Image (cartoon, coloured by chain):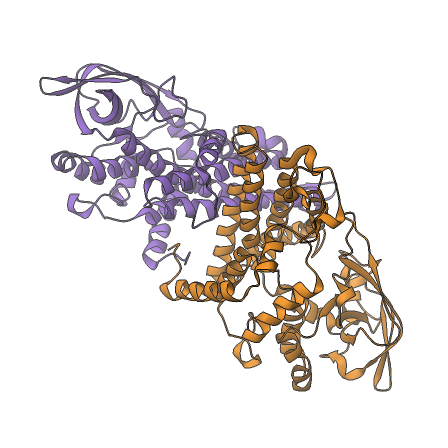
Chain colours: A purple, B orange
Amino acid sequence: MDFDFSDDQQQLRDAVRRWVDKGYTFERRRAIVAAGGFERAAYGELAELGLTALTVPEAHGGLGQGAIDAMVVMEELGRGIVLEPLAQAFVTAGVLAQYAPQELQAAWLPRIASGAVLVVLAQQERKARYRLDVCEAKAVVAPNGYALTAIKNIVSAGDQADAFIVPAQLDGQIALFLVERAAADVSTRGYGTQDGSRAADLQLASTPATLITTDGLAALELAVDTAIAAACAYAVGVMDQTCAVTFDYLNQRRQFGVAIASFQALRHRAADMKMQLELARSMSYYASLKLGAPAEERRRALSRAKVQLGQSMRFVGQQAVQLSGGIGVTDEYIVSHYFKTLTQLEMSWGDTLHHLGEVSARMQEQAGVFA
Amino acid sequence: MDLAFTPEEQAFRQDVRAWVRANLPPAMAHKVHNALRLTRDDLQGWARILGKKGWLAFGWPKEFGGPGWTAVQKHLFEEECAMAGAPRIIPFGPVMVAPVIMAYGTPEQQKRFLPGIADGSVWWSQGYSEPGSGSDLASVKTRAERVGDKYIVNGQKTWTTLGQHGDWMFNLVRTSNEGKPQTGISFLLLDMKSPGVTVRPIKLLDGECEVNEVFFDNVEVPADQLIGQENKGWTYAKHLLSHERTNIADVNRAKRELERLKRIARAEGLWDDQRFRDQIALLEVDIVALEMLVLRVLSMEKSGKNPLDIAGLLKIKGSEIQQRYAELMMLAAGPYALPLIQEAMDAGWQGNFPGGTLANAPLASTYFNMRKTTIYGGSNEVQRNIVAQTILG
């Protein structure tokens, strides 16, 4: 039982933090949002730092690092509310490495690692809300593989990505497929989301696809759990920064002739924010530490984590705006952007109520970190 | 970063588990698992069993006769005791006053007082709060006047937990009115059987007498029962409060009580009631998050870092969780938590409890009792002040 970071992890953290501080300023981010919410060059800079290769197996040109390394990186990206969806590299590389046939791995993993391609998960359907077992997309056998017909929504950077991992029904069960954006009969329609990042609707009409696995639901669950762990870590970074900025503001802002940090009502609110931040950080560690556990244990743990993170994110975000007063509701002030990011994260990969239902359904006699 | 305990720590846990299983009287465990009334004999009986093994002093270093366990080992020991249904260790002697005596007492005082604490033969009480000194502890007024080789003590302490059983008492007393309130306080040990000491139990809202008022009327206390220097008592008291940061969260007990809550929910037909079950799930998440927080503090202590900024959160969250499980247990029983019959909380009671099942008998009482947790040990509002101080200055 040890929650210390290794020297390598500390160096990784420092490197990402340097890039965020110098290379991904609030001004640059603002420009990226204005330009659509995704910048290939910024994604390329993440790749240059080795981050797209982080969790890709060494045999496929990656660095073969684990969930904790990914967590460290995501915390730092959260600190800078970086829009480019690095987590998608962790998610899709993880699924391909664990479930795809060797030749498919060899074709895609080195390019994910180098940042040459962005592969994203496209699972969201209108009728599914947050359920992973609800899927209307259909796959049929075609002369050179498979053909997919599907409508998927809120696909991260969907009109910028190079390929998609898409769940679809095949012979009565969910299978996972890889679809290239350059393939025939792929249409995307991009738009901005709450936090300024980019998403797209994806429409496939008998589109050529390659089978990743027929064990699609299990693979999808692993993908989403990986995404949850990354979102938790990213949220911890956002909340860390939100708290720091807010606490600093309380000491700077003067009303009634004194710093407003002297008012007990506000001090207690700040203490409650700190509580939510640390509970969230604890559960983010827990999420990443449990990613390698057997599926049932992993699912239970990740849902527990998302319930805590969801509550923490909403509280910290809302209170940061409140404690910042009028400036907190302006677009100019960074806290409003932290708040929107936290709101979006709470509603991504299953919101608090959804995961509370999951925890509830998976409850056992005994409970605790080790049960 | 690794969640698993080391093989040595796991082996340690197994040893403790086996010993507790073999030595904890089943009748005691039955009472604890069902929240039945524990007598002085139960509490001190378990203390003596632990004392004989050398484990009542489980937090002590070897040089004072303790096992010299690490923070993690102490946590595992407490977890095994809690899950097995052992009565809680009354902390005033082994956990609270002993470290002060070790750090600031003379060798004679250590020789005189520590053995009786370690073997469970002497019951200690805490003399901190006074009618006018709750959260503002530094305002204590109980006076100790030095006359020759004695102190003459006059005044009143209150909220003295289980003081009706007490043999000895450690007190914050005022020895000077000069300077800041904190600078005139001394740390004095006294024999509760001394002439002039009167203990009066206070009946609480649950009908139990868990705390007491203690009156001092010209009580003569030999001067060699002063710990450290006169007027330095506040420093010693702070040392005491800084000890054992993690056990105040009581997360191990919370895990045991969560299991009991689930049993009650099943018995009351609520396990498949989604609205109620979600409330249990929410509490389960809270408890896992608190446990992770505790483990983080332990890990920091293990690697020599100061967990100050998060340790302050443990009491707030832990006490809120204690109140919540007590509340949910009572709500689970619904109308059958309304009958309140004091005798039904005694083990072996043969009466006919009107609350559906005997398991429901203590639920309301425990709920009422648990309201204390966010008030004592520094109210949660004071705790928030402390947390705010670390983050805002």
* Residue nearest the viewer, comparing A116 with B353: B353
* Residue nearest the viewer, comparing B80 with A195: B80
- Please state the horizontal and vertical placement of residue A129, each as a whole percent of the image: 41, 22
Look at 30% across and 25% down and name the residue there. A122
- Farthest residue to the right: give it: B218
* Residue nearest the viewer, comparing A23 with A278: A278
Vertical placement of residue B283 versus B225, above or below = above
* Residue nearest the viewer, comparing B193 with A42: B193
Please tell me how many numbered marks the rendered image carries.
0
The N terminus of chain B lies in quadrant = bottom left
- Please state the horizontal and vertical placement of residue B253, each as a whole percent of the image: 57, 53
Q: Give the quadrant of residue B191.
A: bottom right
Vertical placement of residue B370 versus A235, above or below = below
- Farthest residue to the left: give it: A143
Look at 43% across and 34% down and name the residue there. A27
Taking the image as shown, residue B348 lies to the left or right of residue B9, namely right
Q: Is residue B56 visible?
A: no
Vertical placement of residue B102 versus A83, above or below = below
- Please state the horizontal and vertical placement of residue A352, each as a whole percent of the image: 49, 32
Look at 36% across and 25% down and name the residue there. A198
Q: Give the quadrant of residue B50.
A: bottom right
- Please state the horizontal and vertical placement of residue B120, each as a whole percent of the image: 65, 73
Taking the image as shown, residue A235 lies to the left or right of residue B251, namely left
Q: Is residue B61 visible?
A: yes
